[in-house]
Image: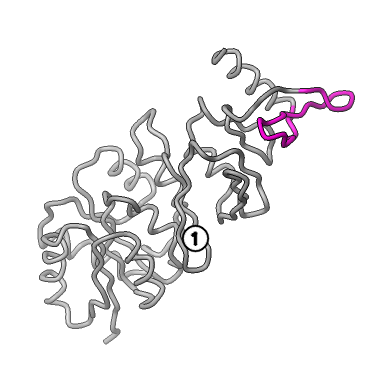
């Protein structure tokens, strides 16, 4: 019989205990660790490399979505555990992601577990898309989570000056410091408030509050001059979006 390593992540002790009791009837599953917050979960996932991850969505500081972004999950089947949230549930259904809705029955737990243990559950999920879909309309990310080695940083979006696309990464520039995050610029754009952040070029998103002015550059090009003097290229379509937002603000 195959042995499975499970990681339980939930900020409520009662919820962790319930999962422990449910899993106690499965001799093939060993609980490698339990975590009460997202930071501990990221460390435990790196240490234990679990086959199964029971992941609470609504946690302080790092949400379940943040945790999923930060861990190596290639061989990990994930079951989200969530209180009622119509937006999250719709997102899970659309992306065919396993989830348990609190309070759940033994039958529902067993069904989710069986599916998680099948190969189907390991399909790649775009976490940024999933997180964006799970937000209520008009709600946007308030901070960006970045992992650098074993260090996890939280960048408040209000402090983000601009982002630049670098292949499968984005370079995030905040208060004169650059950090790399493995994410597409389209995924980042989806998370940010479109009234505050503008895609001025296929490779650049800028914080509108940092734009001092727009200047011509050559015959048909333009550049955005930021308050710190940095110059960013502006495409024709980007200029249209930027001009419209500046007019609305101004």
Q: Is residue 189 left or right of residue 99?
A: right
Colouring convention used in this rendered image of the protein:
one colour
**The N terminus, quarter of image:** bottom left
Residue 205: % across, % down: 62, 36
Q: Residue at x 57, y 12 (%)?
A: 250
Q: Is residue 107 left or right of residue 200?
A: left
Q: Residue at x 38, y 70 (%)?
A: 43
Queried whether the magenta region covers residue 225, the answer comes back as yes
Give above or below for 22 relative to 208.
below
Main secondary structure found in the magenta portion: strand
Secondary structure type for disc 1:
strand
Magenta span of residues: 215-235
Residue 82: % across, % down: 23, 50
Residue 39: % across, % down: 35, 62
Residue 129: % across, % down: 45, 45
In depth, the one of 100 and 12 nearer the eye is 12
Queried whether the magenta region covers residue 101, the answer comes back as no
Residue bearing mark 1: 147
Q: Residue at x 36, y 51 (%)?
A: 96
Crowd class of label 1 (few under 14; some 14 to 19; many from 20; radius 10 Å): some
| Number of residue marks | 1
Q: Quadrant of residue 10?
A: bottom left
Q: Quadrant of residue 223?
A: top right
């Amino acid at each position: 019989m195959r042995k499975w390593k499970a990681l339980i992540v939930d900020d409520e002790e009662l919820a962790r205990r319930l999962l422990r009791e449910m899993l106690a009837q499965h001799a093939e599953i060993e609980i490698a660790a339990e975590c009460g917050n997202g930071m501990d979960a990221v460390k435990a996932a790196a240490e234990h490399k679990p086959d199964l991850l029971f992941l609470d969505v609504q946690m302080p500081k790092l949400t379940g979505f943040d945790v999923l972004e930060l861990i190596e999950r290639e061989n990990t089947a994930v079951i989200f555990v969530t209180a009622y949230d119509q937006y999250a549930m719709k997102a899970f259904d659309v992306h065919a992601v396993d989830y348990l809705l609190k309070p759940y029955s033994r039958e529902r737990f067993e069904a989710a577990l069986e599916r998680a243990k099948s190969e189907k559950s390991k399909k790649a999920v775009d976490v940024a898309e999933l997180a964006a879909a799970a937000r209520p309309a008009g709600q946007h990310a308030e901070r960006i989570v970045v992992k650098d080695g074993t260090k996890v940083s939280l960048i408040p979006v209000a402090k983000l000056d601009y982002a630049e696309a670098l292949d499968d990464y984005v370079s995030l520039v905040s208060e004169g410091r650059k950090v790399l995050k493995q994410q597409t610029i389209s995924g980042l754009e989806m998370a940010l408030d479109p009234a505050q952040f503008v895609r001025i070029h296929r490779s650049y998103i800028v914080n509108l509050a940092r734009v001092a002015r727009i200047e011509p550059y050559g015959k048909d090009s333009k550049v955005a001059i930021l308050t710190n003097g940095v110059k960013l290229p502006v495409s024709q379509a980007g200029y249209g979006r930027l001009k419209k937002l500046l007019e609305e603000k101004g």
